[in-house]
Amino acid sequence: MANYKKPRFKDAAFKRYLSVVLGTLLLVSLLVVSLGTNATPGSSGLDEGLSESVVNIQSFREKLNLPKENDFSIRLEKQNRLPPRNIDLYPRLAKDHITIVLYVHNRPQYLRVVVNSLSKVVGISETLLIVSHDGYFEEMNKIVEGIKFCRLKQIFAPYSPHVFTDSFPGVSSKDCQEKDDAGKKHCVGNPDQYGNHRSPNIVSLKHHWWWMMNTVWDGLKETRGHDGHILFIEEDHFIYPNAYRNLQLLVSLKPNKCPDCYAANLAPCDVNLRGEGWNSLVAERMGNVGYAFNRTVWRKIHGKAKEFCFFDDYNWDITMWATVYPSFGSPVYTLRGPRTSAVHFGKCGLHQGQGKTNACIDNESVNVQVDDTDKVANIRPEWDVKVYQNQPGYKAGFKGWGGWGDNRDHRLCLNFAQMYH
């Protein structure tokens, strides 16, 4: 038996030695090939910073039929890849923080009010504030750059009509206007259901919201791995000091108190109401003032991109109420408190009020009453939930207000849904 084991031991040792030698040679060969094919050091897939973003943007632009960018839009995309501001002041975010996204257009008087209200929100320094701009406006940018009360990131919609002055998505000389007959005028465009051609200043509302949602959830390094809730507010939403703490409570209570609720809201769906003042929580149809939802809900919304992009209404919220939410197959409830934590104060249209001569608010201030109870969390975990059913509002079957009939807008909208996938 000894004579049998000895040669077998030698044979095994030789095989192990041979495998080591071959493995080493293979690794050396791979290293040589790698050095020969990498043009610059540090450009491998391990780099998750700027180079990765550049590659991603270049790859999706090649695959999708996005409008040809100009120098301005390219600069905006580079700005979007910059790291957040104020990291030196707020080096750590709270573990359970809820990111806040403020989407703005060009109403600086409104923005100053909103920023001032946010500066007084309890807990704002614990989180990240993302400001999404519909294009670039210098005064709006300066206001946002002055924010020092939290970590801040700015993003700019690079395909905003405001960035393209002589081509789609902006206005080109060949575009049809108002109720032009494309055949007779030899112009470009498709009318909406009421016979009107697109207005870039109007369609930018829906484009910006959809681009922002896709970018925040799936594009930004800071949020694309975030599965929790994100709060969305607009430049004409006054935020109460207790809003953030109340939202944290609503998010924590929602799984048990209202497991069928898709979101949490800071304000009633009816923007004219301030709440019931009950000692109970409220479940109702999802509103458009201070709404927060998680990635699971975003995936459901993203899955309805076709419904969103082809519905003939330039309003993103009406599109959601009339076609996207109904397609989920069950009522889309949101959970909120019995007293509002946010107020819609706008009294002007989206693209009005930019200048001092046509300001939408008097003396750049609003008269919002903030009581002592609005300065601290006023939601109680032991409260029951009152459910509103069959509320009035836009529902399935509404055909839309139009303004969104151009095939080019439909394609751009669909491209936004695909650009990070």
Image (tube, grey):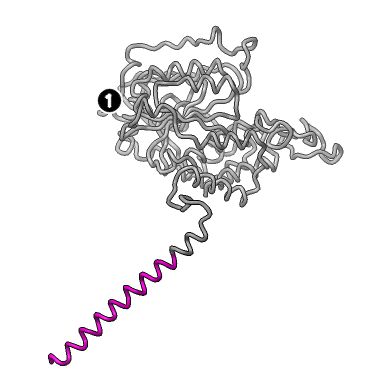
In the rendered view, would you say 59 is above or below 273?
below
Residue 241 is a magenta residue? no
Residue 20 counted in the magenta span: yes
Quarter-of-image position of residue 305: top right
For the residue pair 76 and 178, the one nearer the viewer reads as 76
Instruction: Please tell me which residue is depicted at 46% across the width and 42% down the height of the picture.
Output: 298
Magenta region, residue range: 1-30
Give the x, y percent position of residue 346: 54, 18
Q: Estimate the x, y position of residue 15 in percent, counting from the top left.
A: 29, 80
Report if residue 416 is visible in the image: yes
Q: Say left or right for 289 vs 164.
A: left
Position of 312 relative to 90 (above/below): below
Q: Is residue 207 visible?
A: no
Depicted 359 relative to depicted 260: above or below? above
> Which quadrant is the N terminus positioned in?
bottom left
Q: Residue furthest top?
A: 363
The residue singled out by tag 1 in the image is: 380
Q: Secondary structure at mark 1?
A: loop
Q: Please provide percent x and percent y for residue 233.
A: 47, 27
Q: For residue 169, what is the image quadrant?
A: top right
Of residues 71 and 67, the one nearer the viewer is 71
Mark 1, Cα crowd under 10 Å, few <14 / some 14-19 / many 20+, is some
In this view, the residue in front, 182 or 146, is 146
Dominant secondary structure (helix, strand or loop) of the stretch shown in magenta: helix
